Image (cartoon, helix red, strand yellow):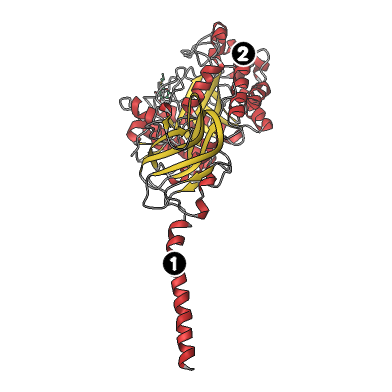
Amino acid sequence: MSIKKIVLRLKNRLVFVAAIGAFLPFYANGQTAPTPVGPVPNARQIEWYHREIIAFFHFGMNTFTNDNEGDGTASPERFNPTALDCNQWTSVLKSAGIGTAIFVAKHADGFCNWPTAHTNYSVKNSPWKNGKGDVVKEFTDACKSAGIKAGIYLGPHDRHDSRYGTADYSDYYASQLSELLRNYGPIWEIWWDGAGADKLTQAFYTRWADSVRHLQPNCVVFGTKNSYLFADCRWMGNESGIAGDPCWSTINPSSIKEEPDHINELNHGEVNGTAYAPAEVDVSIRPSWFYHTEEDAHVKSVAALWDIYFNSVGHNSVLLLNYPPNKEGLVSPIDAKRTDSLGALIRGTFKTNLASGAAIKTLHSRGAKYQPSYMVDNLENTYYAAADGFNTDTIVFNLGAAKTFDVLMLQEVIELGHRTTGWSVEYSKNGKTWIPIPEATGKQSIGYKWLVKFKPVTATQVRLRITDGKASPAIHTFGIYKQQM
Ligand code: IPT
């Protein structure tokens, strides 16, 4: 080989090595996904978040005794819905756009809405359908045919059964749980109310949770008090529909346990909490959980429900909205109309992201696979991510023309953990002067979804300032919208 050829070969090799060298940092920083930070959701929790709203149905002996917390002595004779139709319930949900529902199979008065083999205190000793009825079956069948996921509340507390709190009660409850988890198709969530459940030890729940995991591996667990170890989602700390600001998906297990109460931690979560257990916000559309005619005039207004939506779904939580079916066994048309309007308001408002198509500039782009435009593309699997080493960013959306909006949406990539811990949004009419939106200033958590509403503003540019974080930002959605009242 001539000297010339050898030199040429060496040169080519050098060019090749240099090319790889130039490409590597880009590849390493630009094309690999950010590493998750802190606790992250399991598959059940990811699915749970995407349901956004779950309906709750409180119906049982209390409906007929005009009570909310029956003492367990009311005769089964009193349970007699005249026109029970669970397909009517699910049609209410379909038209409101709600795709998940949880039914109270047994509340604390102990009366069972299905003909369980393990107590006589049930529908089988009621006049309804001559004792041949099964509300759990009618509910799960109706959900199935409507394409709605069905969950079950099986009250841990029991005022009727004298075994409550003893080892025998653990057997009794386990047998009922098994009936419900074996015989009614997929059960999407099990709800372990902590109310009155203080006598139930961790050992009870360990046994019951084993059975849930064994019989329905994908079932979400709402856990509180001594079921805290199994909580896929936690109580939010109040029953009025107002999750905290911030509201972290993370929390310490001792706070979920509620000893002595930990309301503040439940409400806000804990930014450095070691468990991933986001809040499920239980609230009734009426003052009570069960139906009372005298509350027909006090069904929550659409405006109140809209606020609750922002304070629950819009606070990185899932809304569990209760409907109390009446003595006929139907959801009242008043309640149905309100959630119809809520559904229309949600669909109308979030239909058009006024930032879609914006020209977007960021300070620390990670690379082509994580483009800023992915924040406004309305696609499920794309997101913007900043380069490693930058926990803050400034993201400017040039809207191209003046747009008027009064709602803001942010979504993080929950699979990557809570990354951003400080953010604010400002707008500009000329690209020079920036005006803060007070309601969106000094915010902390984002998580699955954060919503803010405010008086309408008109702007040609909007900017998101990420001011603090545990890791480089990973933003799934940035949206601005006009409320469609
Ligand atoms: C409260 C329980 O303490 C909590 O564990 C959870 O189950 C919650 O109810 C559900 O709303 S008690 C209630 C009277 C505030």
Q: Nearer the viewer, residue 134 or 358?
A: 358
**Quarter location, residue 340:** top right
Label 2 or label 1, whichever lies nearer to me, is 1
Image disc number at residue 321: none
Q: Between residue 377 and residue 299, name the one nearer to us.
A: 377
Q: Residue flagged by tag 1: what amino acid is it? A: Ala
Q: Earlier in the sequence, mark 2 or mark 1?
A: 1
- Percent across and percent down for residue 108 are 47, 19
Classify residue 198 by image quadrant: top left
Q: Tell me residue 72's x, y (percent).
A: 48, 14
- In which quadrant of this rendering is ligand 1 seen? top left
Q: Secondary structure at mark 1?
A: helix
Q: Total label count?
A: 2
To which residue does mark 1 refer?
Answer: 22
Answer above or below: position of 455 versus 211.
above
Label 2 and label 1: CA atoms lie apart by: 66 Å
Residue sitting farthest toward the top:
294
| Rendered residue at 44%/72% (across/down) | 18
Residue identifier under label 2: 334
Q: Quadrant of the C terminus?
A: top right
Q: Is residue 235 left or right of residue 352?
A: left
Find the residue positioned furthest to the bottom: 2
From the top left corner, tell me how far across and down residue 304 is, in percent: 51, 17
Residue 120 seen in render: no
Who's the residue at 40% across and 21% down the image? 196
Q: Is residue 245 visible?
A: yes
Residue 275: image location, x then y, percent: 38, 39
Tag 2 near tag 1, CB within 8 Å: no
Determine whether, in the image, residue 246 is placed left or right of residue 124. left
Give the amino acid at mark 2.
Ile
- Count neighbours of disc 2 (C-alpha within 10 A) and say few if under 14, some if 14 to 19, many if 20 or more: some
